Image (spheres, rainbow, N blue to C red):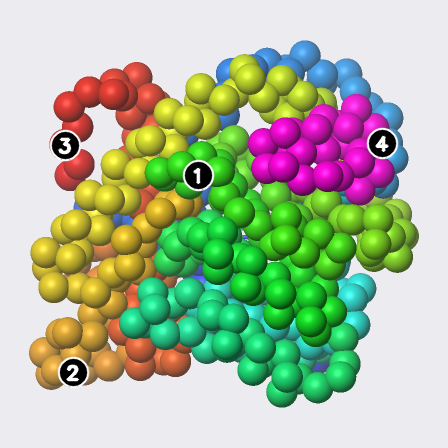
Protein backbone atom coordinates (compact mmCIF):
# COMPACT_ATOMS: atom_id res chain seq x y z
CA UNK A 1 0.00 0.00 0.00
CA UNK A 2 1.40 3.39 -0.93
CA UNK A 3 1.62 5.92 1.87
CA UNK A 4 -0.07 9.14 0.83
CA UNK A 5 0.04 12.73 1.96
CA UNK A 6 -2.43 12.88 4.90
CA UNK A 7 -3.74 16.24 3.69
CA UNK A 8 -4.83 14.57 0.47
CA UNK A 9 -6.34 11.61 2.29
CA UNK A 10 -8.71 13.99 4.09
CA UNK A 11 -10.32 14.87 0.75
CA UNK A 12 -13.16 13.08 -0.90
CA UNK A 13 -14.24 13.51 -4.48
CA UNK A 14 -15.99 16.82 -5.04
CA UNK A 15 -19.72 16.47 -4.28
CA UNK A 16 -20.61 18.18 -7.53
CA UNK A 17 -18.77 15.58 -9.58
CA UNK A 18 -20.22 12.67 -7.57
CA UNK A 19 -23.83 13.87 -8.09
CA UNK A 20 -23.11 14.44 -11.76
CA UNK A 21 -21.85 10.89 -12.15
CA UNK A 22 -24.83 9.40 -10.35
CA UNK A 23 -27.31 11.46 -12.39
CA UNK A 24 -25.58 10.34 -15.61
CA UNK A 25 -25.65 6.74 -14.47
CA UNK A 26 -29.40 6.93 -13.74
CA UNK A 27 -30.02 8.52 -17.14
CA UNK A 28 -28.07 5.71 -18.78
CA UNK A 29 -30.38 3.27 -17.04
CA UNK A 30 -33.23 5.04 -18.83
CA UNK A 31 -34.48 7.06 -15.84
CA UNK A 32 -35.97 10.49 -16.48
CA UNK A 33 -33.62 12.77 -14.55
CA UNK A 34 -33.85 16.54 -14.16
CA UNK A 35 -30.23 17.50 -13.72
CA UNK A 36 -30.01 20.53 -11.47
CA UNK A 37 -26.75 19.37 -9.90
CA UNK A 38 -23.96 20.61 -12.11
CA UNK A 39 -23.16 24.29 -12.62
CA UNK A 40 -22.33 24.17 -16.30
CA UNK A 41 -23.58 26.55 -18.99
CA UNK A 42 -26.05 24.82 -21.34
CA UNK A 43 -25.21 27.19 -24.19
CA UNK A 44 -22.80 26.52 -27.07
CA UNK A 45 -19.50 28.40 -27.05
CA UNK A 46 -20.02 31.64 -29.06
CA UNK A 47 -19.04 31.14 -32.68
CA UNK A 48 -16.35 33.83 -32.75
CA UNK A 49 -14.54 32.05 -29.93
CA UNK A 50 -14.84 28.65 -31.61
CA UNK A 51 -13.60 30.15 -34.87
CA UNK A 52 -10.56 31.70 -33.19
CA UNK A 53 -9.76 28.33 -31.65
CA UNK A 54 -10.04 26.58 -35.02
CA UNK A 55 -7.79 29.18 -36.64
CA UNK A 56 -5.07 28.79 -34.04
CA UNK A 57 -4.42 25.07 -33.93
CA UNK A 58 -0.91 25.72 -35.27
CA UNK A 59 0.09 27.71 -32.18
CA UNK A 60 2.53 25.35 -30.58
CA UNK A 61 5.03 27.38 -28.60
CA UNK A 62 5.04 27.46 -24.84
CA UNK A 63 3.60 30.80 -23.81
CA UNK A 64 4.87 33.05 -20.99
CA UNK A 65 3.77 31.81 -17.55
CA UNK A 66 1.63 34.89 -17.00
CA UNK A 67 -0.18 34.38 -20.31
CA UNK A 68 -0.15 35.49 -23.94
CA UNK A 69 0.80 39.21 -23.71
CA UNK A 70 -2.01 40.31 -26.10
CA UNK A 71 -4.49 38.33 -24.02
CA UNK A 72 -3.32 39.92 -20.74
CA UNK A 73 -3.72 43.31 -22.39
CA UNK A 74 -7.21 42.41 -23.64
CA UNK A 75 -8.31 41.02 -20.27
CA UNK A 76 -7.21 44.17 -18.42
CA UNK A 77 -8.98 46.32 -21.05
CA UNK A 78 -12.17 44.25 -20.79
CA UNK A 79 -12.35 44.44 -16.99
CA UNK A 80 -11.50 48.13 -16.89
CA UNK A 81 -14.15 49.00 -19.46
CA UNK A 82 -16.92 46.74 -18.22
CA UNK A 83 -16.39 47.02 -14.47
CA UNK A 84 -14.51 50.27 -13.98
CA UNK A 85 -11.33 48.70 -12.59
CA UNK A 86 -7.86 50.05 -13.07
CA UNK A 87 -5.70 47.09 -14.02
CA UNK A 88 -2.66 46.97 -16.31
CA UNK A 89 -1.81 43.98 -18.48
CA UNK A 90 1.01 43.26 -16.01
CA UNK A 91 -1.68 42.66 -13.37
CA UNK A 92 -3.24 39.79 -15.33
CA UNK A 93 -2.39 36.13 -14.95
CA UNK A 94 -3.94 33.40 -17.09
CA UNK A 95 -4.50 29.86 -15.79
CA UNK A 96 -6.26 26.60 -16.67
CA UNK A 97 -9.57 27.62 -15.10
CA UNK A 98 -10.08 30.07 -12.26
CA UNK A 99 -10.29 27.10 -9.90
CA UNK A 100 -6.59 26.36 -10.35
CA UNK A 101 -5.59 30.02 -9.95
CA UNK A 102 -7.69 30.33 -6.78
CA UNK A 103 -6.00 27.21 -5.45
CA UNK A 104 -2.53 28.56 -6.16
CA UNK A 105 -3.31 31.90 -4.54
CA UNK A 106 -4.71 30.13 -1.46
CA UNK A 107 -1.56 28.01 -1.55
CA UNK A 108 0.91 30.86 -1.58
CA UNK A 109 -0.75 33.40 0.74
CA UNK A 110 -0.20 32.72 4.45
CA UNK A 111 -2.90 32.89 7.09
CA UNK A 112 -6.39 31.46 7.54
CA UNK A 113 -9.01 31.43 4.80
CA UNK A 114 -12.26 33.20 5.68
CA UNK A 115 -15.21 31.54 3.98
CA UNK A 116 -18.73 33.02 4.20
CA UNK A 117 -21.34 30.26 4.53
CA UNK A 118 -22.75 29.06 2.21
CA UNK A 119 -19.92 29.19 -0.34
CA UNK A 120 -18.74 27.17 -3.32
CA UNK A 121 -17.71 23.59 -2.50
CA UNK A 122 -14.08 23.78 -3.57
CA UNK A 123 -12.68 26.63 -1.46
CA UNK A 124 -12.53 24.58 1.75
CA UNK A 125 -10.86 21.47 0.27
CA UNK A 126 -8.37 23.70 -1.55
CA UNK A 127 -7.39 25.32 1.74
CA UNK A 128 -7.34 21.91 3.45
CA UNK A 129 -4.90 20.62 0.82
CA UNK A 130 -2.52 23.31 1.96
CA UNK A 131 -3.16 22.53 5.64
CA UNK A 132 -4.66 25.98 6.00
CA UNK A 133 -7.04 26.96 8.77
CA UNK A 134 -10.57 27.59 7.46
CA UNK A 135 -12.69 30.11 9.32
CA UNK A 136 -16.32 29.90 8.25
CA UNK A 137 -18.39 33.06 8.65
CA UNK A 138 -22.05 32.41 9.41
CA UNK A 139 -24.83 34.21 7.58
CA UNK A 140 -28.59 34.16 8.21
CA UNK A 141 -31.37 32.56 6.27
CA UNK A 142 -33.46 35.61 7.24
CA UNK A 143 -30.90 37.84 5.53
CA UNK A 144 -30.87 35.55 2.47
CA UNK A 145 -27.47 34.12 3.43
CA UNK A 146 -25.66 37.37 2.66
CA UNK A 147 -22.41 38.24 4.37
CA UNK A 148 -22.96 41.16 6.74
CA UNK A 149 -20.27 43.65 7.79
CA UNK A 150 -20.95 42.68 11.42
CA UNK A 151 -20.26 38.99 10.80
CA UNK A 152 -17.14 39.79 8.76
CA UNK A 153 -15.91 42.17 11.45
CA UNK A 154 -16.43 39.56 14.17
CA UNK A 155 -14.60 36.86 12.20
CA UNK A 156 -11.66 39.19 11.47
CA UNK A 157 -11.47 40.32 15.07
CA UNK A 158 -11.55 36.77 16.42
CA UNK A 159 -8.91 35.61 13.93
CA UNK A 160 -6.44 37.93 15.71
CA UNK A 161 -3.43 39.71 14.33
CA UNK A 162 -2.36 37.24 11.67
CA UNK A 163 -2.85 37.94 7.99
CA UNK A 164 -6.21 36.79 6.64
CA UNK A 165 -7.44 35.80 3.21
CA UNK A 166 -11.14 36.22 2.38
CA UNK A 167 -12.86 34.50 -0.52
CA UNK A 168 -15.93 36.42 -1.59
CA UNK A 169 -18.14 35.24 -4.44
CA UNK A 170 -20.45 37.70 -6.22
CA UNK A 171 -22.80 36.90 -8.01
CA UNK A 172 -23.09 33.99 -5.70
CA UNK A 173 -22.95 30.25 -5.99
CA UNK A 174 -25.05 28.66 -4.39
CA UNK A 175 -27.68 31.34 -3.66
CA UNK A 176 -27.82 33.48 -6.82
CA UNK A 177 -27.37 36.54 -4.59
CA UNK A 178 -25.96 39.76 -5.97
CA UNK A 179 -24.51 42.24 -3.48
CA UNK A 180 -25.57 45.87 -3.66
CA UNK A 181 -23.11 48.73 -3.87
CA UNK A 182 -23.86 49.81 -0.29
CA UNK A 183 -23.20 46.34 1.12
CA UNK A 184 -19.97 46.03 -0.85
CA UNK A 185 -18.78 49.41 0.43
CA UNK A 186 -19.40 48.40 4.02
CA UNK A 187 -17.66 45.06 3.57
CA UNK A 188 -14.74 46.84 1.87
CA UNK A 189 -14.32 49.08 4.91
CA UNK A 190 -13.96 46.08 7.20
CA UNK A 191 -11.49 44.42 4.81
CA UNK A 192 -9.47 47.63 4.73
CA UNK A 193 -9.50 47.99 8.50
CA UNK A 194 -8.11 44.47 8.99
CA UNK A 195 -5.88 44.56 5.88
CA UNK A 196 -7.54 41.39 4.65
CA UNK A 197 -6.35 40.04 1.30
CA UNK A 198 -9.47 39.36 -0.76
CA UNK A 199 -10.06 36.99 -3.63
CA UNK A 200 -13.17 38.39 -5.30
CA UNK A 201 -14.51 35.39 -7.19
CA UNK A 202 -16.35 37.01 -10.10
CA UNK A 203 -16.68 33.95 -12.34
CA UNK A 204 -20.43 34.73 -12.72
CA UNK A 205 -19.87 38.39 -13.61
CA UNK A 206 -22.10 39.59 -16.52
CA UNK A 207 -24.82 37.20 -15.41
CA UNK A 208 -26.54 39.85 -13.27
CA UNK A 209 -30.21 39.85 -14.19
CA UNK A 210 -31.54 43.33 -13.72
CA UNK A 211 -28.81 45.83 -14.15
CA UNK A 212 -25.74 44.91 -16.10
CA UNK A 213 -23.35 46.34 -13.61
CA UNK A 214 -22.14 44.77 -10.44
CA UNK A 215 -20.21 46.31 -7.64
CA UNK A 216 -17.03 44.72 -6.37
CA UNK A 217 -14.62 44.87 -3.47
CA UNK A 218 -12.07 45.58 -6.22
CA UNK A 219 -13.72 48.99 -6.70
CA UNK A 220 -13.85 49.93 -3.03
CA UNK A 221 -10.75 48.17 -1.75
CA UNK A 222 -8.58 47.82 -4.86
CA UNK A 223 -5.25 47.63 -3.04
CA UNK A 224 -6.19 44.40 -1.27
CA UNK A 225 -8.43 42.70 -3.80
CA UNK A 226 -7.60 40.07 -6.41
CA UNK A 227 -10.30 39.57 -9.05
CA UNK A 228 -10.92 36.06 -10.32
CA UNK A 229 -12.79 35.27 -13.53
CA UNK A 230 -12.65 33.34 -16.77
CA UNK A 231 -14.39 31.86 -19.77
CA UNK A 232 -16.40 29.19 -17.97
CA UNK A 233 -19.75 30.75 -17.16
CA UNK A 234 -20.75 33.89 -19.09
CA UNK A 235 -18.72 32.77 -22.12
CA UNK A 236 -20.14 29.23 -21.80
CA UNK A 237 -16.73 27.60 -22.25
CA UNK A 238 -16.04 25.72 -19.00
CA UNK A 239 -14.31 22.88 -20.81
CA UNK A 240 -11.83 25.24 -22.45
CA UNK A 241 -10.32 25.63 -18.99
CA UNK A 242 -9.28 29.25 -19.07
CA UNK A 243 -9.36 31.46 -16.00
CA UNK A 244 -7.83 34.80 -15.13
CA UNK A 245 -6.62 36.47 -11.96
CA UNK A 246 -6.18 40.24 -11.78
CA UNK A 247 -3.70 41.11 -9.06
CA UNK A 248 -3.10 44.78 -8.16
CA UNK A 249 0.41 46.27 -8.04
CA UNK A 250 0.13 46.53 -4.26
CA UNK A 251 0.09 42.71 -4.18
CA UNK A 252 3.01 42.38 -6.61
CA UNK A 253 4.62 39.78 -4.35
CA UNK A 254 1.58 37.55 -4.85
CA UNK A 255 1.88 37.93 -8.63
CA UNK A 256 5.60 37.15 -8.59
CA UNK A 257 5.08 34.06 -6.46
CA UNK A 258 2.16 32.96 -8.59
CA UNK A 259 4.32 33.18 -11.70
CA UNK A 260 7.02 31.15 -9.94
CA UNK A 261 4.51 28.46 -8.90
CA UNK A 262 3.06 28.35 -12.43
CA UNK A 263 6.51 28.02 -13.95
CA UNK A 264 7.11 24.93 -11.80
CA UNK A 265 3.68 23.39 -12.33
CA UNK A 266 1.48 23.83 -15.43
CA UNK A 267 3.91 26.25 -17.18
CA UNK A 268 1.21 28.05 -19.19
CA UNK A 269 -2.28 27.49 -20.56
CA UNK A 270 -2.55 25.83 -23.96
CA UNK A 271 -1.69 28.33 -26.73
CA UNK A 272 -4.75 27.72 -28.99
CA UNK A 273 -7.07 28.23 -26.01
CA UNK A 274 -5.38 31.52 -25.14
CA UNK A 275 -5.87 32.68 -28.72
CA UNK A 276 -9.54 31.70 -28.50
CA UNK A 277 -9.82 33.70 -25.27
CA UNK A 278 -8.31 36.68 -27.07
CA UNK A 279 -11.35 36.67 -29.38
CA UNK A 280 -13.63 36.77 -26.31
CA UNK A 281 -11.87 39.51 -24.36
CA UNK A 282 -10.28 41.45 -27.21
CA UNK A 283 -13.44 41.74 -29.33
CA UNK A 284 -16.05 41.62 -26.61
CA UNK A 285 -18.54 43.60 -28.70
CA UNK A 286 -18.82 40.47 -30.88
CA UNK A 287 -19.74 38.38 -27.85
CA UNK A 288 -21.85 40.93 -25.97
CA UNK A 289 -25.17 40.07 -27.68
CA UNK A 290 -24.64 36.39 -26.81
CA UNK A 291 -23.88 37.16 -23.17
CA UNK A 292 -26.87 39.50 -22.88
CA UNK A 293 -29.23 36.99 -24.44
CA UNK A 294 -28.07 34.09 -22.30
CA UNK A 295 -28.32 36.30 -19.22
CA UNK A 296 -31.95 37.08 -20.12
CA UNK A 297 -32.70 33.39 -20.53
CA UNK A 298 -31.12 32.58 -17.15
CA UNK A 299 -33.20 35.29 -15.53
CA UNK A 300 -36.36 33.85 -17.04
CA UNK A 301 -35.55 30.30 -15.94
CA UNK A 302 -34.34 31.21 -12.46
CA UNK A 303 -37.26 33.50 -11.69
CA UNK A 304 -39.63 30.81 -12.91
CA UNK A 305 -37.99 28.25 -10.62
CA UNK A 306 -37.98 30.69 -7.74
CA UNK A 307 -41.68 31.41 -8.14
CA UNK A 308 -42.48 27.69 -8.33
CA UNK A 309 -40.45 26.97 -5.19
CA UNK A 310 -42.13 29.84 -3.37
CA UNK A 311 -45.57 28.58 -4.41
CA UNK A 312 -44.66 25.17 -3.04
CA UNK A 313 -43.97 26.82 0.30
CA UNK A 314 -40.19 26.59 0.10
CA UNK A 315 -38.28 29.55 1.40
CA UNK A 316 -35.99 30.63 -1.47
CA UNK A 317 -34.07 33.89 -1.86
CA UNK A 318 -34.89 35.41 -5.26
CA UNK A 319 -31.83 34.87 -7.47
CA UNK A 320 -30.41 38.08 -8.97
CA UNK A 321 -27.43 36.63 -10.83
CA UNK A 322 -25.59 33.44 -11.86
CA UNK A 323 -27.83 30.40 -12.45
CA UNK A 324 -28.52 29.06 -8.99
CA UNK A 325 -31.37 29.06 -6.51
CA UNK A 326 -31.25 27.89 -2.91
CA UNK A 327 -34.66 26.62 -1.77
CA UNK A 328 -35.03 25.48 1.81
CA UNK A 329 -37.25 22.51 2.74
CA UNK A 330 -37.45 23.53 6.42
CA UNK A 331 -41.23 23.89 6.24
CA UNK A 332 -41.50 20.17 5.48
CA UNK A 333 -39.07 19.09 8.17
CA UNK A 334 -41.51 17.00 10.20
CA UNK A 335 -43.00 15.23 7.16
CA UNK A 336 -39.50 14.51 5.84
CA UNK A 337 -38.36 13.24 9.24
CA UNK A 338 -41.11 10.60 9.08
CA UNK A 339 -39.35 9.31 5.95
CA UNK A 340 -36.03 9.44 7.76
CA UNK A 341 -34.89 12.46 5.79
CA UNK A 342 -33.28 14.72 8.35
CA UNK A 343 -30.25 16.14 6.58
CA UNK A 344 -29.78 18.02 3.31
CA UNK A 345 -27.59 15.13 2.11
CA UNK A 346 -30.37 12.56 2.70
CA UNK A 347 -32.85 15.00 1.12
CA UNK A 348 -30.68 15.36 -2.02
CA UNK A 349 -30.25 11.62 -2.15
CA UNK A 350 -34.01 11.06 -1.91
CA UNK A 351 -34.73 13.76 -4.49
CA UNK A 352 -32.39 12.07 -6.97
CA UNK A 353 -33.27 8.44 -6.30
CA UNK A 354 -37.00 8.81 -5.72
CA UNK A 355 -38.06 11.91 -7.63
CA UNK A 356 -35.35 12.02 -10.31
CA UNK A 357 -34.12 15.53 -9.53
CA UNK A 358 -30.40 16.10 -8.98
CA UNK A 359 -29.52 18.95 -6.58
CA UNK A 360 -26.65 19.52 -4.17
CA UNK A 361 -27.10 19.61 -0.39
CA UNK A 362 -26.35 22.86 1.45
CA UNK A 363 -23.96 20.89 3.66
CA UNK A 364 -21.59 20.71 0.67
CA UNK A 365 -21.53 24.49 0.90
CA UNK A 366 -20.50 24.39 4.61
CA UNK A 367 -24.01 24.74 6.09
CA UNK A 368 -24.86 22.51 9.07
CA UNK A 369 -25.97 19.01 8.00
CA UNK A 370 -29.53 19.52 9.22
CA UNK A 371 -30.11 22.77 7.35
CA UNK A 372 -32.52 21.63 4.64
CA UNK A 373 -31.33 24.03 1.93
CA UNK A 374 -30.32 22.58 -1.43
CA UNK A 375 -28.65 24.16 -4.43
CA UNK A 376 -30.53 24.10 -7.69
CA UNK A 377 -28.52 24.83 -10.83
CA UNK A 378 -31.21 25.85 -13.32
CA UNK A 379 -29.31 24.77 -16.41
CA UNK A 380 -31.03 21.58 -17.51
CA UNK A 381 -32.39 22.86 -20.82
CA UNK A 382 -31.33 22.82 -24.44
CA UNK A 383 -29.21 25.96 -24.73
CA UNK A 384 -29.11 26.03 -28.53
CA UNK A 385 -32.88 25.71 -28.75
CA UNK A 386 -33.35 28.44 -26.17
CA UNK A 387 -31.07 30.76 -28.16
CA UNK A 388 -32.90 29.97 -31.41
CA UNK A 389 -36.33 30.73 -30.01
CA UNK A 390 -35.63 33.54 -27.56
CA UNK A 391 -37.39 35.88 -27.07
CA UNK A 392 -40.70 34.22 -27.61
CA UNK A 393 -43.31 32.47 -25.63
CA UNK A 394 -41.56 30.12 -23.31
CA UNK A 395 -42.88 27.36 -21.27
CA UNK A 396 -40.46 25.89 -18.79
CA UNK A 397 -41.06 22.24 -18.02
N1 LIG B 1 -15.86 29.79 -8.54
C1 LIG B 1 -17.14 29.42 -8.45
C2 LIG B 1 -18.02 30.07 -7.44
C3 LIG B 1 -17.65 28.41 -9.28
O1 LIG B 1 -18.94 28.05 -9.16
C4 LIG B 1 -16.78 27.81 -10.21
C5 LIG B 1 -17.24 26.71 -11.09
O2 LIG B 1 -18.20 26.03 -10.86
C6 LIG B 1 -15.45 28.24 -10.27
C7 LIG B 1 -15.03 29.23 -9.42
C8 LIG B 1 -14.44 27.59 -11.19
O3 LIG B 1 -14.57 27.92 -12.49
P1 LIG B 1 -13.45 27.57 -13.58
O4 LIG B 1 -12.35 26.81 -12.93
O5 LIG B 1 -14.15 26.77 -14.61
O6 LIG B 1 -12.95 28.91 -14.07
Judged from the image, the secondary structure of the residue bearing numbered disc 2 is helix
The residue carrying mark 2 has its beta carbon less than 8 Å from ligand 1: no
Read off the magenta span. 68-91
Q: What residue is rendered at 38% in x and 67% in y?
A: 145
Report the residue marked by disc 1.
Answer: 207
Nearer mark to the viewer, of 3 and 2: 3
Query: How far across and down, in percent of the image, does residue 376 sit?
Result: 31, 54
Relative to 57, say whether 160 is above or below. Answer: below
Residue 63 badge: 4
Judged from the image, the secondary structure of the residue bearing numbered disc 1 is loop
- In which quadrant of the rendered image does the N terminus lie? bottom right
Report the residue marked by disc 2.
Answer: 337
Relative to 213, say whether 131 is above or below. Answer: below
Nearer mark to the viewer, of 3 and 4: 3
Q: CA distance from mark 3 to mark 4?
A: 47 Å
Q: What residue is rendered at 62% in x and 65% in y?
A: 189
Q: What residue is rendered at 67% in x and 21% in y?
A: 282
Q: What residue is rendered at 10% in x and 59% in y?
A: 312
Please report whichever mark, 1 or 4, sits nearer to the chain's N-terminal start.
Answer: 4
Query: How far across and down, in percent of the image, does residue 357 sit?
Result: 23, 54
Look at the magenta stretch and give its main secondary structure: helix
Relative to 126, say whether 92 is above or below. Answer: above
Nearer mark to the viewer, of 1 and 2: 1
Please report whichever mark, 1 or 2, sits nearer to the chain's N-terminal start.
Answer: 1
Q: CA distance from mark 1 to mark 2?
A: 37 Å
**How busy is the neighbourhood of tag 2: few (under 14 within 10 Å), some, or many (20 plus)?**
few
Is residue 220 found inside the magenta-colored segment of the image? no
Q: Nearer the viewer, residue 1 or 229?
A: 229
Is residue 73 found inside the magenta-colored segment of the image? yes
Please report whichever mark, 3 or 2, sits nearer to the chain's N-terminal start.
Answer: 2
- Displayed quadrant of residue 361: bottom left
Amino acid sequence: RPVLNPLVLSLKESATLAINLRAKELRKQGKDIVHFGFGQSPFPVPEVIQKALAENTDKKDYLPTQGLPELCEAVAGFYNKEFGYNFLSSNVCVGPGSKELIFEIIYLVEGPLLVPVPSWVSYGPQAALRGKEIITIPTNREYNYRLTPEALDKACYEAGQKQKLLIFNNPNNPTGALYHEKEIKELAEICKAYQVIVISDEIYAMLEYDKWAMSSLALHYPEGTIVSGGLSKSFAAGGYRLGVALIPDSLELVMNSLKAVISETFSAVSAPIQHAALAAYGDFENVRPFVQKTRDIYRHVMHYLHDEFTDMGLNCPRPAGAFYAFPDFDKFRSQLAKKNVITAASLSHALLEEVGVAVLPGSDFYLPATNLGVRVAGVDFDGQQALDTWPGRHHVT
